[in-house]
């Protein structure tokens, strides 16, 4: 048996969550399908399947059989495609247009109803002609309903069509015609609302570079980015977009990385710098050696994650999706009751046409996607509405120390030799042992040794002990560098305690199990942390706790300085246990780390946040939310974004719920004529779109808001 594979299948023609359900059901019904996720905004289905049992043609057939959906030929999309009109602009224009058209039609209808013009028209035009008008005008809708019926699907237009025929049955052809008009207007509104959600995601892709200037055979040629090969040199001129992720070979430029990090402050790039696709060279030109192209670039990954964020649905959305599936039968039931009790075909027709099942399902994703799309442009990669929802419940924030709370660039401050060696000898020995370690402390030792121009020895039998230190053989003696737990022989020296009380990290050095020296390293706490912690408190997050592999005293000194809690002496695997322990006590836990060595704890937490994720693939993959730049103020901002988004989602849901209940009640009791019911039916979609668009307003960010002006 072959392994399950994941296919991404483009699906066109889905306008509404109802459609995603049909596509989902059609694919799930095939044999050999393990899971199906249909994304409305990204217009695709992510299908996990067993290739022995099912293939693409079978899936295509199932999808096209489920309705008016098509599966375009799969083109290997290597680069996100550009869109020109932003969602905000789109919303403004379409909103104005639709709002205008809608207002006109609505006034005509209200006026007509009020003045009794429709009754006059109804008697003036012979009934058979009226029926023909209704049938011809509503044909596209009726055709869909008939097709759906043959597939045994009940769609919202099925009920509305019943309403149309109820009106015809009592000779009200004008009413039937107006209902038909609103069914079609409603379709457009719905389409635009869905398209709005789509745009929030896709306008991000407009920032993707399209072409690259490549050096080939001594010539400079312009190519689509997808045709650039890894290792090739691309040339970036002033004002141009960097087309690939890569390393600068020569040249110098000020570059704007806002597309990736959300930070518009330009940074300097020169030979050796790592640059990202979609950044813009403002001044100066660069020659860049290609490392990654298209969807493999950091920017490409962000776009892909945002596109797929829809799959991580929030619980409110799951609930709304489920509810909207039961909604049509409920409405049909109410209509039946209305008819049985009142015997009034027009009231029954009004009930059938007033229900808007689609808006219930759209209320959540439109807002979520707007928020996620907007956040991505500001350097906050949120991988799903689920996480925005969970964020509002977080009550414990756990923070890694090195690289997250501190800059992760420690410096050696003290060297205390213990057995007669000079400090230069100690440093050379330690740096030699640390030669192949990737730990920031090892880097600090190497930098210190290089600063004194010491020559290093070749280490043999190098061994890294995670969370403890390193071992290596240098000139025949066994050298160990690490903390107390690795070197128990290191007696607790009074000076050591003193250094630790200053928040410094100690490296004990042993030579053939004899203590040889103590080195102290100091790391700088990130300058924006006090402000960020204060802002978090303002957001109601009180419990912030430092988790570190460092020792008790060092951790205590730092935690006390910042006014947070701490747990010390943790091995990397202990950090997961701490997360689990809090979860077991019923807390919702956020873990913030630098993503590389904290990946397991990040994944275990309810919300794992990777800080400064630009360029580190592991961090982007492991975390639920990736902050593309190292900016602590993004953390309180996240909480604010989540609150605002969930507020708007709840408002959308409440709005549609109240609207539907009120509409159904009024209609059932005969207070809402069918023409007005039909007009009413498309209003919530407009409301959702307008309300959700508020999330797109360019805000200054948390820093701007919380800063007290002197
Ligand atoms: P943190 O939790 O602060 O990120 P780590 O888990 O990476 O820390 O490491 C915990 C402790 O282990 C460090 O504070 C240090 O004492 C010791 N250690 C780990 N690696 C090394 C190394 N390469 N050299 C010296 N000490 C090390
Ligand atoms: Mg660490």
Image (spheres, rainbow, N blue to C red):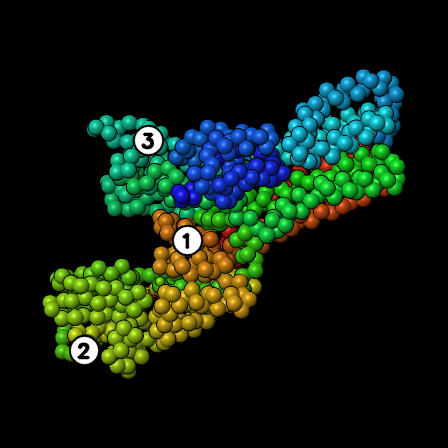
Give coordinates of residue 286: x percent, y percent.
Answer: 28, 38
Residue 55: x, y in percent?
A: 46, 34
Q: Answer yes or no: do the residues labelled 1 and 3 have beta carbons within 8 Å?
A: no
Would residue 246 appear left or right of 202 to someone viewing this image? left
The image quarter in which residue 232 lies = top left
**Disc 2 to disc 1, C-alpha distance:** 41 Å
Check disc 3 and report its element: helix, strand or loop.
helix
Ranked by sequence position, the earlier of labels 1 and 3 is: 3
Picture residue at 20% right of the left edge, 63% below the top: 462
Q: CA distance from mark 2 to mark 3?
A: 59 Å
Tell me if label 2 and label 3 are in contact, CB under 8 Å: no
Report how many numbered discs are placed on residues in the image.
3
Quadrant of res 352: top right
Q: Which residue is mark 2?
A: 514
Q: Earlier in the sequence, mark 2 or mark 3?
A: 3
* Mark carried by residue 227: 3
Furthest-left residue in this view: 475
Q: Which mark is residue 308?
A: none
- Disc 1 is placed on an element classified as helix
Is the CB–ligand 1 distance for label 2 below 8 Å? no
Could you tell me which residue is drawn at 61 percent across and 46 percent down? Answer: 364
For disc 2, the neighbor class at 10 Å (few under 14, some 14 to 19, many from 20) is: some
In screen coordinates, is 465 left or right of 298? Answer: left
User: Counting residues from the N terminus, which is met first, the one under dot 2 or under dot 1?
Assistant: 2
Residue 646, above or below 481? above
Residue drawn at (36%, 76%), measured in percent from left and top?
553
For label 3, being within 8 Å of ligand 2 is answered: no
* Rendering quadrant holding ligand 1: bottom left
Give the left or right position of residue 158, taking residue 81 as reference: right
To which residue does mark 1 refer? 622
């Amino acid at each position: 048996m072959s392994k399950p594979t994941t296919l991404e299948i483009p699906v066109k023609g889905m306008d509404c969550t109802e459609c995603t359900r049909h596509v989902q059901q059609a694919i799930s019904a095939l044999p050999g399908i393990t899971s199906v996720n249909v994304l409305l905004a990204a217009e695709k289905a992510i299908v996990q399947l067993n290739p022995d049992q099912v293939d693409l043609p079978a899936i295509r057939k199932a999808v096209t059989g489920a309705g008016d959906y098509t599966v375009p030929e799969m083109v290997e999309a290597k680069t996100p495609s550009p869109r020109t009109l932003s969602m905000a602009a789109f919303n403004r224009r379409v909103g104005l247009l639709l709002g205008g058209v809608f207002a006109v039609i609505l006034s005509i209808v209200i006026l007509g109803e009020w003045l009794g013009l429709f009754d006059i028209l109804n008697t003036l035009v012979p009934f058979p002609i009226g029926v023909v008008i209704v049938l011809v005008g509503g044909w596209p809708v009726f055709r869909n309903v008939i097709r759906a019926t043959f597939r045994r699907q009940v769609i919202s237009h099925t009920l509305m069509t019943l309403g149309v025929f109820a009106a015809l049955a009592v000779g009200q052809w004008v009413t039937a015609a107006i209902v038909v008009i609103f069914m079609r207007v409603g379709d457009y509104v719905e389409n635009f609302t869905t398209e709005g959600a789509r745009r929030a995601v896709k306008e991000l892709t407009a920032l993707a570079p399209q072409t690259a200037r490549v050096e080939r055979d001594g010539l400079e040629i312009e190519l689509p980015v997808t045709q650039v090969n890894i290792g090739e040199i691309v040339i970036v001129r002033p004002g141009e977009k960097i087309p690939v992720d890569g390393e600068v070979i020569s040249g110098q430029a000020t570059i704007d990385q806002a597309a990736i990090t959300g930070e518009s402050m330009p940074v300097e790039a020169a030979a050796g710098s790592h640059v990202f696709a979609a950044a813009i060279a403002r001044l100066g030109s660069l020659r860049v050696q290609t490392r990654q192209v298209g969807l493999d670039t950091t920017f490409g990954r962000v776009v892909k994650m945002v596109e797929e964020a829809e799959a991580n649905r929030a619980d409110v959305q799951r609930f709304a999706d489920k509810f909207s599936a039961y909604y049509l039968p409920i409405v049909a039931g109410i209509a039946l009751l209305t008819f049985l009790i009142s015997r009034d075909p027009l009231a029954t027709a009004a009930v059938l046409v007033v229900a808007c099942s689609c808006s219930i399902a759209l209320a959540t994703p439109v807002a979520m996607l707007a928020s996620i799309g907007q956040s991505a442009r500001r350097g906050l990669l949120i991988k799903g509405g689920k996480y925005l929802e969970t964020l509002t419940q977080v009550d414990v924030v756990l923070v890694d120390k090195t690289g997250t709370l501190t800059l992760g660039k420690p410096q050696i401050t003290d060297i205390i030799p213990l057995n007669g060696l000079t400090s230069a000898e100690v440093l050379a020995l330690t740096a030699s042992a640390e030669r192949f370690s990737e730990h920031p402390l090892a880097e600090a030792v190497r930098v210190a040794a290089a600063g004194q121009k010491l020559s290093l020895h070749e280490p043999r039998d190098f061994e890294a002990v995670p969370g403890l230190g390193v071992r290596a053989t240098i000139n025949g003696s066994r050298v160990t560098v690490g903390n107390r737990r690795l070197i128990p022989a290191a007696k607790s020296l009074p000076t050591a305690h003193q250094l630790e009380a200053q928040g410094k990290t100690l490296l004990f050095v042993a030579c053939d199990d004899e203590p040889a020296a103590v080195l102290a390293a100091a790391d700088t706490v990130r300058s924006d942390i006090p402000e960020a912690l204060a802002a978090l408190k303002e957001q109601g997050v009180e419990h912030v706790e430092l988790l570190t592999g460092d020792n008790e005293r060092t951790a205590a000194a730092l935690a006390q300085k910042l006014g947070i809690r701490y747990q010390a002496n943790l091995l990397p695997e202990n950090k997961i246990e701490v997360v689990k322990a809090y979860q077991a006590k019923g807390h919702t836990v956020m873990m913030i780390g630098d993503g590389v060595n904290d990946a397991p704890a990040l994944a275990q937490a309810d919300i794992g946040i990777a800080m400064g994720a630009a360029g580190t693939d592991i961090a982007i993959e492991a975390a639920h939310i990736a902050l593309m730049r190292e900016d602590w103020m993004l953390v309180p901002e996240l909480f604010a974004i989540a609150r605002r988004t969930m507020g708007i989602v709840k408002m959308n849901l409440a709005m549609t719920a109240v609207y539907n209940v009120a509409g159904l009640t009024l209609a059932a009791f005969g207070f809402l004529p069918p023409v007005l019911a039909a007009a009413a039916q498309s209003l919530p979609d407009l409301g959702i779109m307008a309300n959700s668009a508020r999330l797109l307003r360019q805000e200054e960010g948390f820093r701007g808001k919380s800063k007290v002006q002197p």
